[in-house]
């Protein structure tokens, strides 16, 4: 196994602290504080920021927020749009294309990246950007350096007045006291999940975490997985548990005392329905006490879980051979349009 992956998981709080401090120092024109809507463009791990903002910070956002993970810029993007181009590497094809289109549309564009063409475009337009040095991500993998992307974007939105909240980094110190327990529980759960397809379930402020751990399961453990959120899944998914009878699924519920009461009731009842249909069900109960700390805790727990799943399947947690193969082949094809 590659220990740099494990080191990166354990350094997520340090990534967050670095990003919050550095991104707060980015200078913006006054006009960037006059947006009427916001768009985040990203793919894969670089789109996690949208799902986190939509769940963790949902009640604090002061402008409508949309995601863009296609080649088609929404028609409403224009001079009153804050356009955030999110790409860890700065080389993501779709994000580069859309950033260029957003500049043409006159949007207020900012980039969050480690470098690459994305930063070069911003420099060409004399436009703001947050470029980080990933000194707390020894693995070099974007999905293991999400503290930079997630908290870099949050810091920018706080500074511009579009996130009516101040992220108190001191709450991250609480993570140290639960790290050993979360790692141990992740190790135990990984053993139980070998040979089945995990289905992650979360709610409220941790909904974005379910999306993240699904993707990490794909890339890190080379394992198919799915995720759903409560209450949405209660309106359709449960009827799909009957067939086929030999389904190899296991549900992993992420529970928090900070969920609204009704959603906690729903989560417990959903687990009962899953078990009545003969499907395995496990619960990870969050241990920290604030929304921010819980988000980071579950982000790390998911990292541990998928790292241990990779070990059980004897997979390299850093390698992404099929994504690399796909990008190489795609690079030989014609232009986008």
Image: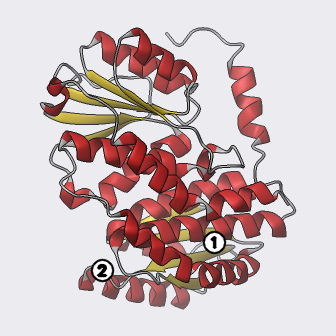
Q: CA distance from mark 1 to mark 2?
A: 28 Å
Residue 96 percent location from the top left of the image: 48, 21
Residue 336 percent location from the top left of the image: 53, 13
Residue 236 percent location from the top left of the image: 38, 68
Q: Is residue 177 above or below residue 143?
A: below
- Which disc is residue 244 wearing? 1
Of badges 1 and 2, the one in the foreground is: 2
Residue 80 percent location from the top left of the image: 15, 25
Q: Say if residue 44 shows up in the picture.
A: yes
Is label 1 in a helix, a strand or a loop? Answer: loop
Q: Which residue is mark 2?
A: 263
At a point 43% along the width and 14% down the height, the residue shown is: 123
- Residue 104 occupies which quadrant of the picture? top left
In front of the other: 294 or 129: 129
- Which disc is residue 64 wearing? none
At a point 69% along the width and 27% down the height, the residue shown is: 327
Could you tell which of marks 1 and 2 lies nearer the N-terminus? 1
Is label 2 in a helix, a strand or a loop? Answer: helix
At a point 25% along the width and 20% down the height, the residue shown is: 107
- Residue 195 occupies which quadrant of the picture? bottom right
Q: Is residue 273 above or below residue 81?
A: below
Task: Report the quarter where the N terminus lies.
Answer: bottom right
Q: Residues within 10 Å of mark 2 (few under 14, many from 20)?
A: some
At a point 19% along the width and 44% down the height, the residue shown is: 162
């Amino acid at each position: 196994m590659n220990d740099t992956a494990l080191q990166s998981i354990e350094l997520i709080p340090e990534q967050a602290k670095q990003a919050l401090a550095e991104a707060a120092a980015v200078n913006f024109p006054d006009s960037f504080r006059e947006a009427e809507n916001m768009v985040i463009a990203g793919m894969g791990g670089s789109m996690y920021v949208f799902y986190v903002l939509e769940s963790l910070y949902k009640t604090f956002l002061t402008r409508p927020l949309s995601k863009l993970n296609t080649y088609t810029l929404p028609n409403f993007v224009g001079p009153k749009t804050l356009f955030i181009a999110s790409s860890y590497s700065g080389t993501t094809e779709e994000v580069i294309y859309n950033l260029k289109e957003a500049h043409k549309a006159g949007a207020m564009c900012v980039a969050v990246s480690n470098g690459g063409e994305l930063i070069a475009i911003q420099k060409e337009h004399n436009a703001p950007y947050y470029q980080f040095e990933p000194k707390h991500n020894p693995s070099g993998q974007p999905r293991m350096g999400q503290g930079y992307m997630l908290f870099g974007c949050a810091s920018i939105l706080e500074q511009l007045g579009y996130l009516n909240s101040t992220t108190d980094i001191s709450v991250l110190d609480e993570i140290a006291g639960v790290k050993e327990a979360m790692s141990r529980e992740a190790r135990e759960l990984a053993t139980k999940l070998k040979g089945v397809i995990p289905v992650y379930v979360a709610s409220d402020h941790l909904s974005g975490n379910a999306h993240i751990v699904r993707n990490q399961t794909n890339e890190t453990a080379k394992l198919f997985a799915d995720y759903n959120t409560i209450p949405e899944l209660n309106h359709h998914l449960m009827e799909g548990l009957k067939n086929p009878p030999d389904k190899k699924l296991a549900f992993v519920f992420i529970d928090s005392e900070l969920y609204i009461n009704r959603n906690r009731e729903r989560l417990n009842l959903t687990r009962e329905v899953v078990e009545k249909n003969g499907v395995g069900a496990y619960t990870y109960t969050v241990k920290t006490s604030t929304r921010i700390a819980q988000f980071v805790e579950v982000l790390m727990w998911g990292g541990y879980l998928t790292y241990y799943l990779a070990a059980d399947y004897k997979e390299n947690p850093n390698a992404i051979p099929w994504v690399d193969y796909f990008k190489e082949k795609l690079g030989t094809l014609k232009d986008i349009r």
